[in-house]
Amino acid sequence: MAFIVRHLSYHLAMGAWGGDVEPFARFIEEGGELGDDARKFLANHLRGAIKRRRGNPRIAADEERRMRAIIEIRGIQILKNCSEYAAISVYLSTHRDANRDTVKSWLRRSRNRVQK
């Protein structure tokens, strides 16, 4: 099987097709060079030829936010030698936009991934 090196814009365009449009938009705004695949994607998108995927895609930025929160909470637990509940309380005191139940579900999902 041959390894095909693709232009960076191709990977960003495929991410945009999957719902993560911000990196591709920044790349275009910064004057990044577009490969043929990315040009084709943009032309088809502008014509409405590309259908959006169904469902609510978890975009990379959201996944990164979840992972940072999990790492920060685990760090608080280690540094303060406290329970998960206390660590979440400390995290929420500095991140007022976060919801306790949401953060708890992030932690539960991360535990489930490790166990599988």
Image (cartoon, rainbow, N blue to C red):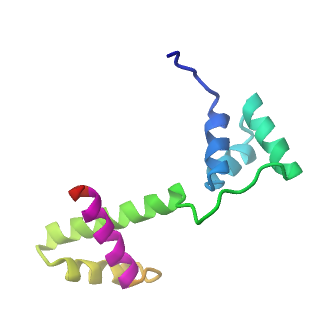
Q: Give coordinates of residue 9: x percent, y percent.
A: 67, 36
Occupied quadrant, residue 51: bottom right
Q: Main secondary structure of the magenta part?
A: helix
Residue at 28% across / 84% down in the picture? Answer: 89
Rendered location of residue 75, percent (x, y)? 22, 65
**Outermost residue to the top:** 2
The answer to whether one can see residue 86 in this image is yes
Q: Which residue corresponds to the image point at 64% horizontal and 61% vertical from the top-left?
A: 54
Asked if residue 112 is among those painted magenta in the image, a careful observer would answer yes
The one nearer the camera, 20 or 116, is 116
Dividing the picture into quarters, in which one does residue 77 lie? bottom left
Q: Position of residue 108 (x, y in %)?
A: 29, 71
The residue at the far right in this view is 47
Nearer to us in this view, 108 or 9: 108
Q: Residue at x 67, y 49 (%)?
A: 17
**First to last magenta residue range:** 100-113
Query: In the image, what residue occupies the spot 30% across and 63% down?
Result: 110
Report the front residue among 68 and 113: 113
Q: Is residue 52 left or right of residue 114?
A: right
Q: In screen coordinates, is 35 left or right of 100?
A: right
Q: For the C terminus, which image quadrant?
A: bottom left
Q: Viewer-proximal residue, 47 or 89?
A: 47
